[in-house]
Image: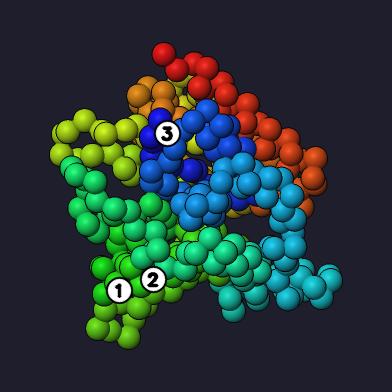
Amino acid sequence: MRSDLVLEGGGAKGVALAGAVAGLAAHGIRFERIAGTSAGAIVAALLAAGMPAQELDRLARELDLRALVPAGPLDRLGRVGQGLRGLSVLLELGIFDHRPLMAWLRERLAALGVETFGDLRREVDGDDVSGRRQYRLVLAAADITRGRRVLLPWDYDEYGLDPDAQPVVPAVAASAAIPLVFEPVRLPFPDTDDTAVLVDGALLSNFPVDVFDRTDGAPPRWPTIGVKLTARPEGPAEIVTPVTGPVSYLRAVIGTAVTAWDQRHLDDPRVVARTVFVDTTGYPSLDFDLTPVQRAALADRGHAAAAAWLGARP
């Protein structure tokens, strides 16, 4: 069965994405195009580059996230550094250093023969989408200088850049650049000295499940399957965040920004029907100290969710 695939972001919980994808692939589902946000962007890039789903699942279970997402230099100074974390944010716009993770990803992609988006072009096969969208990989990021979602490589031409020539890893870094956690990625505006600042796509759309939907009214050639790192909603989804002070206020503001765009999808039963829901309750997104047992548990939840979704299909 051919399908497009959309992977939600979720930080360290992305291990569950690898498990869900392996579960789907084990039942013969072949992914034509893959979109991802944040952690979903990392999984999507490896899959689109040709890494077998079962190998990706094994890799996710074995991966020491803390080694790839080390604390910033100030945190290595102990209590003094902890007190100066705000300075790290001011100087670098991020607490954690994402360079080891991106170097690891660059090495894995190179082994698969992928460096730029040109390496991920799809062959046009008849009635298809426009040439600018002929890629196996699409990554969601947020351009906070223009206040809009960007889909890479589709939108590179808006910055005067050739999509085929753009390296994949910086686009993944942009999609995964959680504000104030990881340093953002900058792109030059065409014919100016200004730059666009790109951050985690989850800020505007953590689950862009409609990204591959046709807009010409014609029926899809194959379905889209989404993988979301929350439990399946029993009814109209409702998220309540109590606001009792400055911290909870900030949490509610950020939570609204992250969930509002995607909330309209989850209120649509047709979207729910094409989504694999992986319950990752109890696993914080920024817990990069997951133990091997915890990583295995997350991957197993992904496998189980995929099996349940497949079993419920008509």
Q: Nearer the viewer, residue 77 or 50?
A: 50
Rendered-image quadrant of the N terminus: top left
Q: Amino acid at mark 2?
A: Gln
Q: Measuring 36% from the left and 65% from the top, which residue is drawn there?
A: 118
Secondary structure at badge 3 equals: strand
| Mark 2 or mark 3: whose residue is earlier in sequence | 2
Residue 255: % across, % down:
51, 45
Q: Is residue 251 visible?
A: no
Label 2 packing within 10 angstroms: few (<14), some (14-19), many (20+): some
**To which quarter of the image does residue 120 belong?**
bottom left
The circle on residue 232 is: none
Residue found at the very far top of the displayed protein: 314
Q: Locate residue 42 relative to residue 86 in the image: left or right.
A: left
Residue found at the very far bottom of the displayed protein: 193
Q: Measuring 72% from the left and 53% from the top, which residue is drawn there?
A: 63
From what the image shows, is residue 51 above or below residue 268? below
Residue 292: % across, % down:
79, 45
**To which quarter of the image does residue 143 belong?**
bottom left
Q: Nearer the viewer, residue 165 or 267?
A: 165
The circle on residue 161 is: 1
Q: Are marks 2 and 1 in contact (CB under 8 Å)?
A: yes
Q: Measuring 75% from the left and 55% from the top, which residue is drawn there?
A: 64
Q: Amino acid at mark 1?
A: Leu
Q: Are marks 1 and 3 in contact (CB under 8 Å)?
A: no
Identify the residue position indicated by label 3 in the image.
225
| Mark 1 or mark 3: whose residue is earlier in sequence | 1
